[in-house]
Amino acid sequence: MDDNTTRSQLAELHPAGYGWALACCGRDPAAAEDVLQTACLKVLQGRARFDGRSSFKTWWFAVIRHTAADERRRHWLRRLRLAAFGALQSDRVHEEAFGDALDCEQRQAAFAKALAVLPERQREVLHLVFYQELSIEAAAEVLGVSAGTARTHYTRGKQRLRAWLQQAEVSHEPARSRQSDPALVL
């Protein structure tokens, strides 16, 4: 289907698409407008393609539904991160009373550095599974490797991070000295 045909069908279905987006967004007009615009962009940028297995309208409504679900998930994750940030801020106020705020920041920096030290494939698989919430098989597909290879990288990456965390927990040293410890091999 060429771009002009797609655009004309999108324009024709726009009112019905807005109604469907409104239904998918819990009757929130602002969210429905955002979802509809994002869905249109997906189609026009080629990130969603009509393959003719159903009618254009059915396919278009599915694109809107998936886009609305993605937006709900993003909104939920944003709220979760804000709640975690708020809890972290209240924890930091508590820690600062005891002088532990710097140690907490150092541990976070050391953990970020430990993640960065992981081999690229292990880091990529862990990122896709934990942060992007993909299955190991889906992560394998994204990375263009077999599922077995992805499972191996996932397991090895988790083992290395676990070993680092256990060593950090046992040592109770300031994070700065753990970072420079040559015996710590990830």
Image (spheres, rainbow, N blue to C red):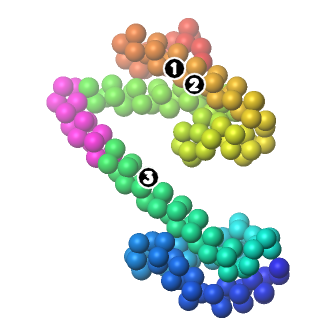
**Quick one: 100 or 68, which is closer to the camera?**
68
Pointer 1 local density, CA inside 10 Å: few below 14, some 14–19, many at least 20: few
Read off the residue under disc 1. Answer: 162
The type of residue carrying mark 3 is Leu
**Residue at image location 25% in from the left, 36% down from the top:** 92
27 lies left or right of 154: left
**Quick one: 52 or 45, which is closer to the camera?**
52
**Residue at image location 37% in from the left, 54% down from the top:** 79
Mark 2 element type: helix
Vertical position of residue 64 compared to residue 146: above or below? below
Q: Outermost residue, right direction?
A: 1
Q: Are marks 3 and 1 in contact (CB under 8 Å)?
A: no
**Residue at image location 75% in from the left, 70% down from the top:** 49
Q: Which percent across, then down, holds residue 137?
A: 69, 40
Q: Which percent across, then down, holds residue 31?
A: 44, 73
Read off the residue under disc 2. Answer: 158
Asked if the stretch drawn in magenta spans residue 15, the answer is no
Magenta residues?
A: 85-99
The type of residue carrying mark 1 is Arg
Q: Which percent across, then down, holds residue 20?
A: 53, 79
Pointer 2 local density, CA inside 10 Å: few below 14, some 14–19, many at least 20: some
What numbered label is drawn on residue 105?
A: none
The type of residue carrying mark 2 is Lys
Can you see residue 70?
yes
User: Which quadrant of the figure contains the C terminus?
Assistant: top right
What numbered label is drawn on residue 77?
A: 3
Vertical position of residue 87 compared to residue 22: above or below? above
Q: Are marks 2 and 1 in contact (CB under 8 Å)?
A: yes
Q: Are marks 3 and 2 in contact (CB under 8 Å)?
A: no
The CA span between labels 3 and 2 is: 23 Å
Question: Would you say the magenta stretch is mainly helix, strand or loop?
Answer: helix
**Among numbered discs 3 and 1, the one appearing first in the sequence:** 3
